[in-house]
Amino acid sequence: TAVADAPAVPREQLTPAQRALVRKTHQTIRGVTQDFETDLQLNTAIAKLMELLNAIADFDGEVGGPEAAGETDRAVMGDALRTLVTLLAPFAPHVAEEMWEGLGQTTSLTRQSWPTFDEALAREETLEIPVQVNGKLRSRIFLPPGTPREEYERAALADERVRAFIDGKRVVKVIVVPERLVNVVVS
């Protein structure tokens, strides 16, 4: 039987596990494409394919396998599997063709176009931001991309572990590198 096509479900209506697999799929397309186009970094492209394979396996385990998966689960998984096989084709064309047929595809994999990624779907929903006090890592905060600088500062200063290191000290300044780092300087 053919693997289900990609869902026509808005991203906001996908479960967190479904969104994570869609995100990983698009991140993999972006990464492998860049590895081919710019650097010919074949070893890192293979590593990215292995990461996608692991994400697919984790997703399958989370939804309880194909029998327990709903229609949207199967569609998200199908899209990830077709993408994986398509991206694998330059490395192992014969095996990829067999896998393609195993997914129920009736046309040859050689007739498939290279997948394209959607930057919005590849973007992380939450970023893990390291928080330093006087240059030493003390905690991590989690914020969505595009968060204003003031929110980084507020979240860092409100963090319990950071507060333990700044209690009784004067905050000289808070250095914010959006989407990368917060450093609280105390004296």
Image (spheres, rainbow, N blue to C red):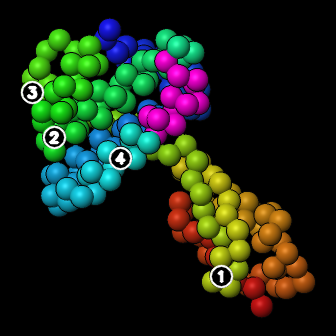
Quadrant position of residue 85? top left
Q: Mark 1 sits on what residue?
A: 136
Q: Are the residues tagged 3 and 1 within 8 Å (C-beta)?
A: no
- The chief SS type of the magenta part is helix
Q: Are marks 2 and 4 in contact (CB under 8 Å)?
A: no
Secondary structure state at the residue bearing disc 4:
helix
Return the x and y of residue 154 as percentages of the image width and height.
74, 62
At label 4, the amino acid type is: Met
Q: Nearer the viewer, mark 3 or mark 2?
A: 2
- Mark 2: amino acid: Ala
Q: Quadrant of the N terminus?
A: top left
User: Disc 1, disc 4: CB below 8 Å?
Assistant: no
Amino acid type, label 3: Thr
Instruction: Say left or right for 20 vs 163.
Output: left
On whether residue 56 falls in the magenta region, the answer is yes
For the image, the number of numbered tags is: 4
For the residues marked 3 and 4, what is the alpha-carbon distance in whole angstroms? 22 Å
